[in-house]
Image: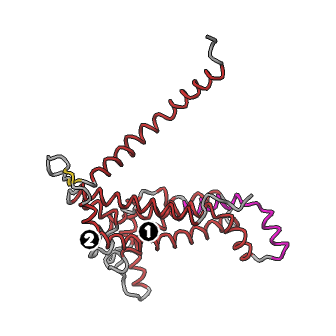
Amino acid sequence: MGEAQPGRRRSRSDLGIALVFVAPALIGFVLFYLVPTVRGIYLSFTKYSTLSLADPKWVGTANYEAIAKDPLFWNALGVTLEYVVINIVLQTALALGLALLMHRIAKSTIIRGALLLPYLMANVIAALLWFWMLDYQIGIVNQIIEWLGLPRVAFFGSQEWAIPTQALINTWRHMGYTALLIFAGLQAIPNHLYEAAHLDGASSGQAFRRITLPLLRPVLVLVLVVTVIGSFQVFDTVAVTTQGGPINASRVIQYYIFQRAFTQHDFGYGSALAVILFVILALVAFIQMKFLRGNESDLD
């Protein structure tokens, strides 16, 4: 038998080296993502409490049937949707405006880097900072409002303001990072397209509508997908500030999952809620990528 070809030996060697580099990430993915996901799906079909020493008891689709009739779940889903809409609209609009300003006016890397400072702050720290600033009694924001002759606002204590306030906090924290993503997309648009549009007599608004937005579509779709998924999973701000109140006005679905699983110790029900949230996020991401054509670009 002839000797193995050098090319084949080299490819096997390269494969072995690649596996060595991939192995740590693969092991981490299996241990911390795949295994918990599979176990969570299994627990969603069981009745299981951490307060009991008994093994999970298979109940089939009973948890999902109970969720369909659970008013707290539908309230949490509605509250979450309200938060997502406010957060997405504000964050995307403000980030797009900041990105355009950075692209045309602010050339300093210091200014661009400063926009990331809120994003580098931990969620809990950001929530506590704004919780104190917006406090009804001693918060500096309400002090300024009263100084202006206006009535104080219970930002976290009223049903009308609880969710919009938390959406504003997270918009403030993530806006700079989102703006930098959009700014990177603006950098990829060739300048000669704007020069040609200017020579044809196009105004700045027309150039924005007909050149900037179409060529930014892949980046904007990425931003929307990431922001929507992150918004559906809001938890830290709610846990630190309102704990779902007042009167369930800010009980988002992630916080409801936490309450059922870790406060009421009903892991089966909590796992079913988590599976439903996973399905919702997968459907939302698929719809966004499909209908917004996120994998296509007009820049050829």
Along the line of sight, the residue nearer the viewer: 15 or 42? 42
Q: Amino acid at mark 2?
A: Lys
Q: Is residue 106 magenta?
A: no
Q: Which residue is mark 2?
A: 69
Hey, which quadrant is residue 94 in on the image? bottom right
Disc 2 to disc 1, how far (Cα)? 32 Å
Q: Quadrant of the N terminus?
A: top right
Q: Are marks 2 and 1 in contact (CB under 8 Å)?
A: no
Q: Indicate whether 37 appears above or below 31.
A: below
Please state the extent of the stretch shown in magenta in the rendering.
175-201
**Looking at the picture, which amino acid does disc 1 mark?**
Ile
Question: Is 151 rendered above or below residue 279?
Answer: below
Residue at 78 percent of width and 62 percent of height: 191
Work out whether 59 lies above or below 89.
above
Instruction: Check the image and tell me how it is coloured.
Output: secondary structure
Rendered image: mark on residue 169: 1
